[in-house]
Image: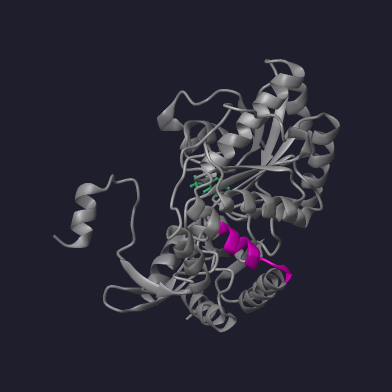
Amino acid sequence: MDLKTLDSAFVAPTYRRFPLEIVSGSGSVVFDEKGSRYIDLTSGIGVTAFGVADPVWQEAVTAQIGLVQHMSNLYYTAPCAKLAALLCEKTGFEKVFFSNSGAEANECAIKVARKYAADNYGSDRFTIATLDGSFHGRTLTTLAATGQEHYHELFQPLTPGFIHIPPTMDALKAAAKEHKLAALMIECIQGEGGVIDLPQDFVRQARAFTEENDILLICDEVQTGNGRTGALYAYMHYGITPDVVSTAKGLAGGLPLGATLLSEKVQHTLGYGDHGSTFGGNPVCCAAALSVLQRIDDALLTDVRTKSDRLRAAFEGADGIVSVSGMGLMLGLKTVKPASEIVASLLDRGVLCLTAKDKVRLLPALNIPLELLLEAAETIKDVCRVSA
Ligand SMILES: Cc1ncc(COP(=O)(O)O)c(C=O)c1O
């Protein structure tokens, strides 16, 4: 049985796969089973922060595997504690809860918000506002948080206590009047929603308003976090500090790890037995994340911003490319031809890209060489071209 037949026969059919099997790679170049080369601008949807089979990452992972691959959270392990300390040192947050995915990092953030509000204002203050077009995960609660109706339809009833609003101060103030809000949860750049940057004014004013009213501000940095946008976390571009940050994807560079960062205000909200995860804080995942986080320094962030500028310059005025959104190496191209058609053509031309709603989405590894990025940009421009 060939791989495609085997996969279709036994893997639950929730993913529409491209006709491509990736068997190996190095950095931002990957190879299929026939040895054909592809430039990877997807990094496993923003996960392999330093590309495929990165030697530094491999060394960190294999060294920890040789010591202890897992130990329950009943005991101390060094990578978990060291990673939490480094995350706090780099952000100014006070505590970290580790889980295994973005959705779980958000689940923790939501539990913190619900408990903080109940502890301080009573059990009728529980509503969490999120934004239209947002995406926060696939569990029933994070689906409820997700501000896109079509994800909700098949799975009713979802967790109650979520409302979705447009990103305007009028809408936020009206929501706070009508509901007892525990939290506002935002992605500074909506990823799955179409690579949409939230307006600077809205984010700043929303932070001021939530602070005044002791409504927690949760930034979902699952996709935007860990250097992706040219800052360690995207909220840093907005000059604000949230109360809670959730992250995952690129954090461990290719192993499953979610983290929820807790500010001083909420650092003690969850106590013994209030939350947990068998695999959360796994030593191999944390060792991988330590090596990733240690490499996301100012020089790397500057390099991400420089590569972003070069890419934007390459797309500026290109035939068939209407506009470019996003920040750093999280970019969305609005194209004249349908995004799905472009991504399919790019695959035939040896470039892997993603879609996000009606846009072509680029999420390359943070350390992708500039020449490779510009080589891919030329192919993208060629495929996007509409005039003969
Ligand atoms: C902003 C955001 N939040 C949450 C999630 C869910 O993350 P995971 O698939 O790791 O559960 C995603 C995934 O794309 C995301 O982009």
Query: How many labels, in total?
Result: 0
Residue 106 position (above or below residue 46): above
The residue shown at (62%, 79%) is: 314
Q: Is residue 265 left or right of residue 364?
A: right
The residue shown at (39%, 71%) is: 347
**Residue found at the very far left of the displayed protein:** 1
Whether residue 25 is in magenta: the answer is: no
The residue shown at (70%, 20%) is: 118
Residue 33 position (above or below residue 233): below
Magenta segment, prevailing SS (helix, strand or loop): helix
Quadrant hosting residue 26:
bottom left
Whether residue 297 is in magenta: the answer is: yes
- x%, y% of residue 381? 53, 77
- x%, y% of residue 328? 66, 66
Q: The N terminus is located in which quarter?
A: bottom left
Quadrant hosting residue 345:
bottom left
Q: Nearer the viewer, residue 123 or 54?
A: 54
Q: Nearer the viewer, residue 295 or 166?
A: 295
Find the magenta span and give its range. 289-298
- x%, y% of residue 370? 59, 80
Residue 331 visible in the shown view: no
- x%, y% of residue 155? 42, 29
Q: Nearer the viewer, residue 322 or 237?
A: 237
Q: Nearer the viewer, residue 67 or 149?
A: 67
Q: What sort of colour scheme is used for the picture?
A: one colour
Residue 112 visible in the shown view: yes
The residue shown at (83%, 42%) is: 205
